Amino acid sequence: MLLWVGCLAGALKDSEYSDELVDIHIEPTRVYSTEDARAWLTSGSLDVDSIAPPVEGKFMSAVIGARKPG
């Protein structure tokens, strides 16, 4: 669980990219589901079915491309 949360905690907001870049394109490579986190969450005795639905499909890995202006 700590590894999963640590990875997400370092993610940048989209506005942090878009404020300084142009010609931005995002290509999702994987959208994560409740099932992806089930093993980690259940090993910590958490009720996956009650806490996961609000975040279902809202985390992804992606290739992000852009240019610096000028």
Image: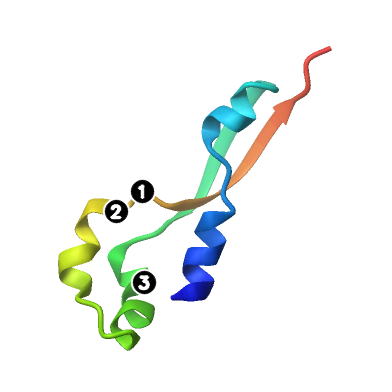
**Disc 3 residue type (three-letter):** Ala
Q: Nearer the viewer, residue 64 or 52?
A: 52
Query: Which mark, residue 69?
Result: none
- Horizontal side of 33 relative to 8 (left or right) equals left
Element on which disc 3 rests: helix
Q: Are marks 2 and 1 in contact (CB under 8 Å)?
A: yes
Where is the N terminus found, in terms of image quarters?
bottom left
Taking the image as shown, residue 35 lies to the left or right of residue 32, namely left
Please name the amino acid that badge 2 sits on.
Val
Give the residue displayed 36% in from the left and 48% down from the top: 58
Q: Label 1: state its secondary structure.
A: loop
Q: Position of residue 53 (x, y in %)?
A: 20, 58
Q: Badge 1, how many Cα within 10 Å: few under 14, some, many 20+?
A: few
Quarter of the figure with the C terminus: top right
Quadrant hosting residue 40: bottom left
Quadrant position of residue 45: bottom left
Residue kind at label 1, given as amino acid type: Lys
Residue identifier under label 2? 55
Residue that lies at the very extreme toward the left in this rendered image: 50
Earlier residue among tags 3 and 2: 3
Which x, y percent locates residue 44?
Answer: 33, 84
* Residue 50 vertical placement versus 53 (above, below): below
Give whichever of 21, 26 is nearer the camera.
21
Q: Residue lying furthest right in this view?
A: 70
Q: Does the residue at mark 1 contact the one at mark 3 (Cβ under 8 Å)?
A: no
Residue 45 to residue 16: above or below: below
| Residue carrying label 3 | 37
Q: Is residue 70 left or right of residue 45?
A: right
Tag 1 residue: 58
State the separation of the CA atoms marked 2 and 1: 5 Å
